[in-house]
DNA sequence: GTAGTCGTACTTTTT
DNA sequence: GTACGACTAC
């Protein structure tokens, strides 16, 4: 790689060795597998730039597929920044669905697709299927039918072998399902609609029958590959059919879309179909503190079937994640607010509200959080969940637009027929639809004929209603349609989308309609309409700026140019999960982010809250795959950079006082969490600052501006809300009495107890004997030892990080391969994974892997380089051995294989303790501005909550202001305007 | 037939 | 806190 042209240096700069190798790999197929925070997306984006700039592919010959609109947008931005000249807009980049739609728009007619096809979103599908089920009196649940149909389409056509299985008679209403499927598909065809799955299915059809569509494509890159489903895999291969050059990045641990038919299996399929694939893993985690990673790993490792990867933190230990137990969901929300305030204030606004995310299993959990934030006047935004486009008034206008675009869209027309009120009721509408369908007319033409007197509908329509339909619905829409045709026909000024919407609103007298129907909140809804217009305007501007996203011309095949804005706008609405509602003009004030975990994938925040970590929420009651739920929690946890809080309410909502149980994913590791928020003293804050690479304001200024009566510690809520009556917590025996105790002593094995529980040991002991690390000590304040020890730990962590950084420079040669894993388990991930090869250097302590196979189980199948990769840093392998953890490890329940594999020393993200000699040198050279490590015997009392003296990093110079006396401190939150939620703002 | 009122039963995750 | 169904008044 050393002989690359200088131009490429810029691309490779700032990447680590493994990333560099991934970016510049010459292999046709490249699979980059890496854990969270390892720079996957960045690497993929860099590879795109590399392929264009260094290798020389034309941008328009590169296909990049992502899963979410947000990811696509970000990818485009990143690539654009590096490429310049707007070349990124030529790249065929987008979600699978949007790329498929573009191809279908351009070439669809070659496979008999109506040029003006529309997209049926989920609610359309649901409505159609419900109607079918009702009409034909099918005994299947419409929702289940929809899922079944979708799964069938998503599976793809290649997997014929396995389709034999589930199809058997075991499916109860199979007959009905089949009927429903047929009817549904027929209905979509008649209305020229494609549902989400159809976009992919039809595109596969297109590319198979007309490979020349993609004859220009040189290379295909896929982000978040673990989320591809069968049909997407086919699509990927078809896009790459000419040159078979594919790059994927993914992380099996973050596969959270199984319910949408994502198949982790696709990873093995890829390696099977492209055996020469260059596998690269990225192992350094640049995002999270070591504590956060350690705990996340403990969670994900409970999945014994997973393919394991190394994940090495480069950051300091950081403060331990918190697992907080609250009385109710309301208390939980209030507690979150109090912790946010605490973090912001005690960091002297080094952390602000936009650094905070609250990640939820389900969007519906946001209610309490939203109202607590609202009450506290903290601005926030909700990502995922209720979508802007799903608001009733927006949907209505969208339906109008859809009918303008596609008069044959009966469903949309039926929904708007009586909105605004035109004196037509359900019965009439239903009758008309039936009539239209039975005479194979569209509803639109039926109405048109009726109103023109060409044909009288059998269904009775009152004269009054007829007039209003004719004058208030048919005629205005015809007019608009005519104007569109005229405009596009003679290339005159196209009829502006915004004009169209505004004209529609006027003719319909929509504002009055809103007033009539929603007397309570019509104003808000009208504001939504304005925002909608704004979005449309943005969309148009964006199109004009970046030009049409036409596909590169192909000699052999005629393309249909997409000239009209309307269809593209509608498609954009259906395919965009989020309206890009952000930043119009107004200085973006810092907002707390509330998001579903799904929507948070790929993102990161300094501070992350994961509320509602209880059985039933995570894992969700209705979830079928509990491993996936665990991965979901893992994804949530690994979003955090420096502070991670999990919490759960003991009692679910006020309505029924049912008790919640802590999520099973964390019960066994619950002791590794803090029971309440960390004390944000100087050392802790400094560590946070270091992880975030930010500057921490001086201590005086932080405490100088604390509001009066401010609670410095997380003590507004009882640590155990049930303790009042001496309750048993009911989470098993070791959990019962919760005695806080300081951990001041060194553990016998010489590992210094840096205030953190000895995690591994804890993990082991929770599973067998719980007594082993009870350390008798002063009763009193938990955190005291933590903080002083944190100082030492911090210094050490820096060295460790340094060491890892150093060692990781040669990492690329040592990455382990998944090839063995795949080959040993050719067709399923159900099989146990190959044991992670342990350190192969003799210097590493041998007992750790006494019974591990020396090589990857696939040994014979591995290439030489494969084997070479299996070396592990000796330090990494060494640690757990030195600690003698192996002895206390219980034999793992499932199988010997698991048990022997279990030594996770090798996967551990904990770097080894520094070697003594180096310690001194490094500390002295390194910690100039650091406090000298404190004496191990600092009395605990200095951290007493109410008299909080901060441990004087600087010799006790600063004391916290007494709080009561000081006046005129500006509470920064005063300045923040209360945020009015789009949804509902009353509690 | 339409429109308004009341009571009941749900509320995973996304393209 | 809402969406849908049943019931009742026009």
Image: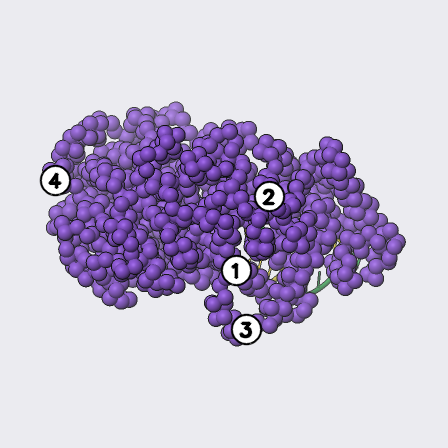
Chain colours: A purple, B yellow, C green
User: Real-space Cα distance between discs 2 and 4?
Assistant: 66 Å
Chain of the residue displaying label 3: A
Same subunit under labels 2 and 4? yes
Q: Quadrant of the N terminus of chain A?
A: top left
Mark 3 or mark 4: name the one nearer the start of the chain.
3
Q: What element carries label 3?
A: loop
Q: Mark 4 points at which residue?
A: A916
Point out the residue furthest to the front here.
A556
Residue at coordinates 58% horizontally, 40% vertically from top-left?
Answer: A552
Residue at coordinates 14% horizontally, 39% vertically from top-left?
Answer: A936
Please indicate, yes or no, whether residue A849 appears anywhere in the rendered image.
Answer: yes
**Direction from residue A691 to residue A800 in the image, left or right:** left
User: Real-space Cα distance between discs 2 and 3?
Assistant: 48 Å
User: Real-space Cα distance between discs 1 and 2?
Assistant: 27 Å
Mark 4 or mark 1: name the one nearer the start of the chain.
1
Q: Mark 2 points at which residue?
A: A554
Mark 3, mark 1: which one is toward the viewer? 1
Same subunit under labels 1 and 2? yes
Chain of the residue displaying label 1: A
Mark 2, mark 3: which one is toward the viewer? 2
Indicate the position of residue A75 as horizontal and vertical percent values.
47, 39
Chain of the residue displaying label 4: A
Indicate the position of residue A517 as horizontal and vertical percent values.
70, 46
């Amino acid at each position: 790689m050393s002989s690359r042209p200088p131009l490429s240096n810029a691309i490779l700069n700032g990447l680590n060795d493994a990333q560099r190798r991934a970016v510049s790999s010459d292999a046709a197929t490249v699979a980059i597998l890496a854990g969270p925070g390892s720079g996957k997306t960045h690497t993929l984006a860099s590879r795109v730039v590399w392929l264009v700039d260094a290798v020389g592919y034309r941008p328009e010959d590169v296909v990049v597929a992502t899963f979410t609109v947000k990811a696509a947008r970000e990818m485009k931005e990143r690539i654009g920044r590096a490429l310049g000249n707007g070349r990124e807009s030529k790249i065929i980049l987008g979600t699978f669905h949007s790329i498929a739609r573009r191809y279908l728009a351009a070439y669809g007619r070659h496979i008999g697709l109506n040029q003006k096809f529309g997209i049926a979103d989920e609610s359309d599908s649901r409505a159609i299927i419900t109607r079918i089920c009702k009409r034909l009196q099918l005994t299947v649940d419409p929702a289940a039918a929809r899922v079944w149909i979708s799964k069938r389409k998503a599976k793809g056509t290649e997997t014929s072998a396995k389709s034999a299985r589930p199809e058997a008679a075991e499916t109860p209403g199979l007959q009905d399902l089949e009927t429903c499927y047929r009817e549904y598909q027929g209905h979509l065809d008649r209305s020229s609609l494609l549902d989400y799955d159809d976009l992919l299915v039809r595109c596969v059809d297109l590319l198979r029958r007309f490979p020349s569509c993609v004859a220009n494509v040189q290379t295909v890159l896929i982000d978040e590959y673990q989320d591809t489903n069968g049909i997407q895999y086919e699509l990927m291969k078809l896009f790459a059919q000419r040159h078979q050059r594919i790059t994927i990045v993914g992380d099996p641990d973050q596969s959270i879309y199984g319910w949408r038919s994502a198949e982790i299996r696709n990873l093995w399929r890829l390696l099977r179909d492209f055996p020469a694939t260059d596998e690269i893993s990225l192992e350094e985690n640049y995002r999270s503190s070591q504590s956060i990673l350690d705990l996340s790993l403990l969670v994900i490792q409970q999945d014994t079937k997973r393919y394991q990867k190394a994940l090495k933190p480069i950051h300091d230990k950081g403060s331990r994640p918190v697992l907080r137990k609250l009385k109710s969901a309301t208390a939980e929300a209030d507690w979150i607010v109090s912790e946010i305030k605490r973090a912001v204030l005690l960091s002297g606004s080094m952390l602000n509200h936009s650094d905070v995310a609250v990640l939820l299993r389900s969007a519906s959990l946001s209610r309490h959080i939203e109202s607590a934030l609202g009450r506290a006047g903290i601005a926030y935004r909700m990502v995922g969940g209720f979508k802007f486009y799903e608001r009733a008034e927006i949907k209505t206008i969208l339906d109008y637009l859809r009918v303008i675009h596609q008069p044959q869209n009966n469903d949309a027309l039926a929904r708007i027929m009586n909105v605004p009120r035109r004196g037509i009721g359900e019965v009439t509408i239903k009758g008309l639809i039936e009539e239209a369908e039975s005479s194979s007319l569209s509803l639109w033409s039926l109405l048109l004929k009726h109103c023109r007197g060409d044909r009288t509908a059998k269904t009775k329509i009152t004269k009054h209603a007829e007039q209003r339909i004719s004058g208030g619905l048919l005629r205005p829409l015809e007019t608009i349609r005519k104007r569109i045709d005229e405009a596009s026909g003679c290339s005159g000024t196209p009829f502006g989308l915004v004009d169209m919407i505004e004209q529609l609103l006027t003719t319909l007298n929509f504002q009055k309609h809103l007033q009539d129907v929603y007397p309570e909140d019509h104003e808000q809804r009208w504001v939504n309409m304005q925002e909608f217009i704004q979005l449309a305007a943005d969309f148009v501007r964006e199109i004009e700026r970046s030009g049409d996203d036409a596909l590169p011309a192909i000699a052999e095949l005629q393309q249909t140019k997409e000239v009209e804005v309307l269809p593209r706008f509608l498609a954009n609405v259906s395919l965009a999960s989020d309206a890009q509602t952000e930043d119009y003009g107004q200085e973006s004030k810092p907002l707390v982010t509330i998001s579903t975990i799904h929507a948070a994938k790929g993102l990161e925040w300094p501070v992350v809250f994961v509320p509602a970590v209880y059985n039933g929420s995570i894992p969700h009651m209705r979830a079928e795959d509990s491993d996936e739920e665990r991965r979901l929690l893992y994804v949530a946890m690994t979003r955090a950079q420096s502070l991670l809080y999990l919490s759960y309410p003991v009692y679910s909502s006020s309505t029924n006082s049912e008790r919640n149980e802590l999520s099973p994913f964390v019960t066994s590791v619950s002791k590794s969490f803090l029971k309440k928020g960390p004390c944000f003293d100087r050392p802790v804050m400094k560590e946070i600052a270091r992880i975030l690479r930010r500057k921490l304001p001086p201590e005086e200024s932080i405490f100088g501006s604390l509001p009066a009566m401010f609670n410095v510690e997380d003590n507004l809520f009882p640590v155990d809300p049930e303790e009042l009556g001496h309750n048993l917590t009911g989470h098993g025996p070791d959990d019962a009495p919760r005695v806080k105790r300081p951990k001041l002593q060194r553990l016998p094995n010489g590992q210094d107890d840096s205030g953190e529980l000895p995690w591994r040991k804890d993990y082991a002991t929770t599973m067998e004997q719980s007594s082993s690390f009870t350390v008798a000590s002063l009763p009193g304040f938990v955190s005291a030892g933590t903080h002083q020890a944190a100082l030492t730990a911090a210094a050490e962590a820096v060295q460790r990080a340094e060491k890892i950084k150093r060692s990781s420079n040669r990492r690329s040669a040592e990455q382990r391969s998944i090839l063995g894993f795949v080959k040993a388990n050719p067709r399923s991930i159900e099989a146990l994974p190959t044991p992670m090869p342990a350190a192969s250097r003799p210097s590493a302590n041998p007992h750790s892997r006494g019974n591990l196979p020396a090589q990857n189980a696939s040994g014979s199948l591995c290439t030489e380089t494969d084997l070479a990769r299996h070396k592990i840093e000796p330090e990494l392998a060494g640690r757990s051995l030195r600690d003698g953890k192996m002895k206390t490890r219980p034999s793992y329940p499932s199988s010997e294989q698991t048990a022997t594999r279990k030594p996770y020393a090798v996967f551990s993200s904990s770097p080894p303790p520094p070697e003594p000699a180096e310690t001194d040198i490094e500390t002295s050279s390194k910690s100039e501005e650091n406090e000298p490590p404190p004496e191990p015997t600092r009395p605990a009392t200095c951290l007493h909550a109410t008299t909080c003296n901060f441990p004087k990093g600087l010799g006790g110079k600063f004391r916290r202001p007494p709080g009561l006396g000081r006046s005129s401190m500006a509470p920064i939150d005063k300045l923040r305007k209360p945020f009015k939620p789009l949804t509902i703002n009353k509690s």
